[in-house]
Image: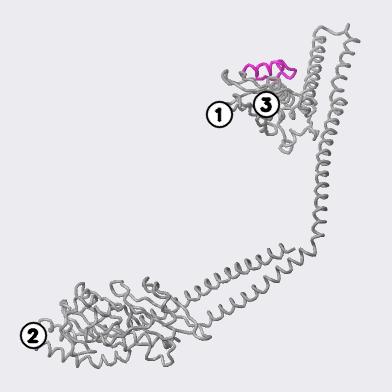
Amino acid sequence: MKKIHYTSLISVVLLQLAFYSVLHRNLIKDIEGELWVQNAQADIKVKSAINTYTMVSELAFTQIINQEEILSLYSKAYTADSATQASIRNELYHKLVPVYQQLKSQNIKQLHFHLPDNTSFLRFHRPSRFGDDLTNHRYSVKMANLEKKRYNGFEEGRINNGFRYVFPLSYKNQHIGTVETGFSFEAIRTLLEMQGNPYSTLILPRSVVQSTVFKEELNNYDSTLISTEYMVENAFSHYTIDTTGLLQTIEKKIQPKLVEKFKQHKNFSTYTQIGKQFYTINFISIENLKKNHVAYIITYQPNQHIQQITKRHKLFLGLGLTIIPLIVIFIILYIDNHQKVKNQNIRLTESINQLNLRTVELQELSIQLQKLIDDKNLFIRILAHDLKNPFNELMTMSGLMISRFRHYEPDEIEQQLTNFHHTAKQTYNLLEDLLLWSKSQAGNLPFEPQVYLFNFICKQAYSGFTPNTKNISIDCLVSDDIRIYVDLNMFRAIMRNLISNAIKFTHPNGRITISADYNQDVVTICVSDNGIGIPEENISKLWQYTRSLTTPGTEGETGTGLGLTLCKVFVEKHGGKIGVNSRVGEGSTFYFTIPSTEV
């Protein structure tokens, strides 16, 4: 009993550990699924915001900037001297400053003209800053001037970072430079707030900021709590709107598990719990025009689904850890209280098994007995009926010959003797089949196969049937080189019965053909006739002598049905198969396979 209790205690512990492991895996899987959904939704919201401002930028370019008045003025800037450039710059600024103010109201805060050599000509957001070469700092400007086609996407700037739309400018089929509109992360944050995301920010790798931004502008950037490798632009810092310090608490808590995630430069989401509330933090990777990762847009939002998932996990865990010990205790009580019943069941099962064995033995004996009864009935039927008829014929014919001998002509005597011989031969063949069959059933029939020439045995087999009373021709269409590996007595019995069966069901003056085909050490032998054929429903009954399927021949000949059964037994003894193809009114072909060499 103590051993059972000790084993049960171990079982409880192991089951609880297994249950906790499965439940914990499901918890992780459910949370990962929720985070995937949250990240996908955040990605859609960010892309939707970007697409909105893309439409505004394209509209500003096509409807306002890419016009005759602006293009004709700006076309003179590249080749002009510095004084003329200053005049053009001043005039261009005053013409478009109202447009720029309107764009700013739509959160597009950058309007920037560049000369064909990538020199900054006019920054509307910083008019006093011009003349600097952007070739090595602004990939979009360089490529738009070089390829004279539009470039747009996120790009690091020397003052501000944002989403740039650089359009090539041409006047009278002459490339005159490029113009750029752009919006900062502030525009995206505004739309995200309208979509239910109160907290969001944009962070950039420290290496990108330090290699791109003007040195005097670096004080506009600050480190983040989420990673020492990333910085945030002060103008868009999320910390300024975090009056409760919630975001700083979240970032400090999740910072350790983000190190590897940041190295992958892909979208991802994580979560954390502050007090009783769960929060999802979504990271959307931003690539520049060169398809390099240069920023993350981060959104922070409460998540009730994860809270529900964890509550459900705790509920199942509590139920499982409570129910498992109860189940084990119940099993212990069951074992203790039913041990005697178990022993009784074992003894009862043993008795039932013994009874079942006896039943099986009785069933086998019953089958054997039934077979003996069937065999006995067959012998009685053959002896009482099938042997009685030929003996009656013999007695009748012999009686007629004795009583009328002096009145018969020589031809009539010869005919009566021929009939007498035919009946005696049929009776002998029947007795020989009975003897072979009884020996095979008793297992006393010797099996001594040897290699023979089939043509020789074939001629022996049908010679006993030629001539015959029906004047049926028998042809053996077999080449002289085909050999078979058979027991001679059994094979003769097979051929004798198949030929006799063909004669029985063939009309007078008909034809029987014997053929053989050699294929891969197996000989297929066919006995074909052009007789009356066999109905399809009777074919499956041919090999079952107990079914008493006997059909009179074309001249009223009778039979026992034993011959075909004997053929099947002897063919299978040689490892072969026997079958028949037949069509009513056209004839039948009995075929069987025999090995050509020793197996």
Q: Is residue 87 above or below residue 173?
A: below
C-alpha distance separating marks 1 and 2: 103 Å
The residue that label 3 is drawn on is: 529
State the extent of the magenta-drawn residues as a range: 454-474
CA–CA distance in space, label 1 to label 3: 27 Å
Residue 173: x and y in percent read 16, 76
Judge the density around disc 3: few (<14), some (14-19), many (≥20) Cα neighbours within 10 Å. many
- Would residue 263 be visible to someone looking at this image? yes
Q: Earlier in the sequence, mark 1 or mark 2?
A: 2
Residue at mark 2: 81
Residue 212 vs residue 552, the one in the foreground: 212
Using residue 411 as the reference point, say whether residue 91 is left or right of it: left
Tell me the quarter of the image containing the C terminus: top right
Residue 564 higher or lower than 133, as above or below: above
Q: According to the image, label 1 marks what residue?
A: 520
474 lies above or below 371: above
- Please state the horizontal and vertical placement of residue 577, each as a whole percent of the image: 66, 32
Q: Earlier in the sequence, mark 1 or mark 3?
A: 1
